Image (cartoon, rainbow, N blue to C red):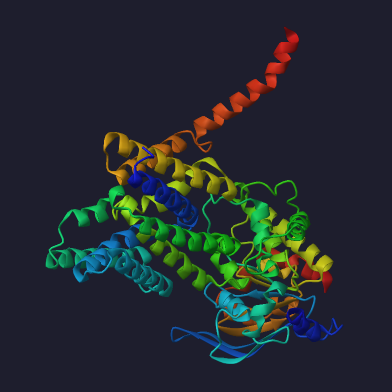
Amino acid sequence: MLEYGFMQKAIAGGIIAAIACSLISFFVVVRRLAFVGMGISHAAFGGVAIGLALGINPIVTAGIFCSLVSLGIGVVSKKGRVHEDTAIGILFVSAMALGVLLVRVAHAYNIDLMSYLFGSILALGWGDVLALGITTLFSTLFTVLFFKELLFLAFDEETATASGVPSSVLFYGLLLTMAVLIVVSIKLLGIILVSALLVIPASVGMQIFKNYRGVIIASLSSAVVSVLIGLYLSWKFDLASGAAIVLVMFLIFAASFILSPRRRYMEGLVSRIGSARRTSPEKKMNS
Amino acid sequence: MRRSCKVAEFFDGKTEGLNLIRLEHVDVKLGGRTVLENINFSLEPGMFLGVIGPNGAGKTTLLRVILGFVRPSSGNVSVMGMSPSELKSELHHIGYMPQQVLFDRNFPVSVLDVVLMGRVCCIGLFKFPSREDRSAALESIKLVGLEGLENRQIGELSAGQQKRAFLARALCKETKILLLDEPTSGLDMPVQQQFMELLDRLKGNLNLSIVFVSHDVNVLARYADELACINRTMHIHGKPKEVLSSERLKEAYRCEFDFLVGQGRGGKTEANH
């Protein structure tokens, strides 16, 4: 399948998106920003529709629009006048409603719109892969350079602030990074499914590991593996790429959930295997 | 380095007669409501100041004023000779323990990772913890008696052990002042006592100055050098014995003194005076 140009682009873009999103997904999960991710990604529909209506590249308009929405969510939740989930609930449906109206006005109910909604690997160009690469570079730099501060803030915001960590700047930075990553990953996964890449990978890691190092490694590898298997399945059986990737990711999550060392039945199993190992040399000695 | 200069200049070899923290006629309004009114107090090096007062008396706000989170509407605040805005570059001298750290039980960090967070202002932006930082963190873990648990996930520790881990985090820098917000709340009596004894020992060994906020008079009566009782404004400030025998304490809490102090009256305070 690698001889096809569109598959090369899809695989390159997919791996890049998986790396960037799974890294930020760690903070999305520990700071409980999953719904923020959903909100930003759905609001992208409004941004895409503006682009389609004005005849500008929809990814550019969606990028600007989603950045504004993410900052809006941040401001509202920081000021505390409206609960964060309420603010997201209001902003994302309004942005989608705007999208529906604009799409009608622009007569843009076509295949192009469908590819934004559900993702299409055929629509992915080298330009998109390049955009993904540049965004990934910046988002990875942001997460790596501010890792200890972001971790401190996620764990205990008050003490972090009292230790001089710039909490507001980093919170908005995190939201903006999420927004931009969501937008550049839309062509691959689609508006409806893209937030999965920000939530599921780290959730897999959290099921298996007790330390963030393990969680991040599991998050990265599960995301990359899901993208590769998903793309292969979508090529082999002519499935929608975004849906295939998300379902593979879900299956990996389900397996990690069932086999998690946190489950009580697994605790028993792990200790039984451990004791079997300890007793086996003695058995050998006796025989 | 400019950073330590100010603090060195402030101390200038002296250990006595300095006011590490000084609040003069401080008023604080939050959302149009007066939360603190005409607060005056000072903290000398090596002093353990207990701030008591009922729930909602403005005790946490007082700590936030010292840290520079909340700007007073009038009055002066000085910490180690600096205004709260200048203090931003000197936060590595202040250890803070908030009232409650609400984190997910499964939060994937070890005790060592949590204590290392305390060094965030020593490490600086864009840098990773060095071997020195790790050994400082391990040293703090040993100080609070959690050695052997450094690789445990923080959520697996008991409530008392978690509090000690947060104390280690507050000490894991060049701490001169400790600001503690109800650090013993939610602990049962024996664990509370253990924590207080540990704090008392560390205060002596590390030459710490402490502001300890609590609604529980009993906890502080035995260990504090001075007590300040606030309920919006400062009702009384002095040696524990004076404060506890004062009518004004009752006034602040608006209830009976015996009910408040209970068993704590016959503790270290009486024996010392």
Q: Is residue B249 above or below residue A257?
A: below
In the image, taking residue A283 as reference, residue A108 lies left or right, namely left
Residue A26 shows in this picture:
yes
Residue at the (64%, 57%) spot, across then down: B114
Compare residues A262 and B4 and report the one nearer the observer. Answer: B4
Residue B188 image position (x, y, % from top left): 63, 54
Residue at the (79%, 70%) spot, across then down: B270
Compare residues B14 and B267 and report the one nearer the observer. Answer: B14
* Rendered image quadrant of residue B37: bottom right
Residue at the (52%, 74%) spot, across then down: B56
Residue B15 image position (x, y, % from top left): 84, 81
From this viewpoint, which residue is outermost toward the top? A287
In the image, taking residue B52 as reference, residue A217 lies left or right, namely left
Residue at the (32%, 53%) spot, across then down: A124
Q: Is residue A7 above or below residue B241?
A: above
* Rendered image quadrant of residue A108: bottom left
Compare residues A74 and B150 and report the one nearer the observer. Answer: A74
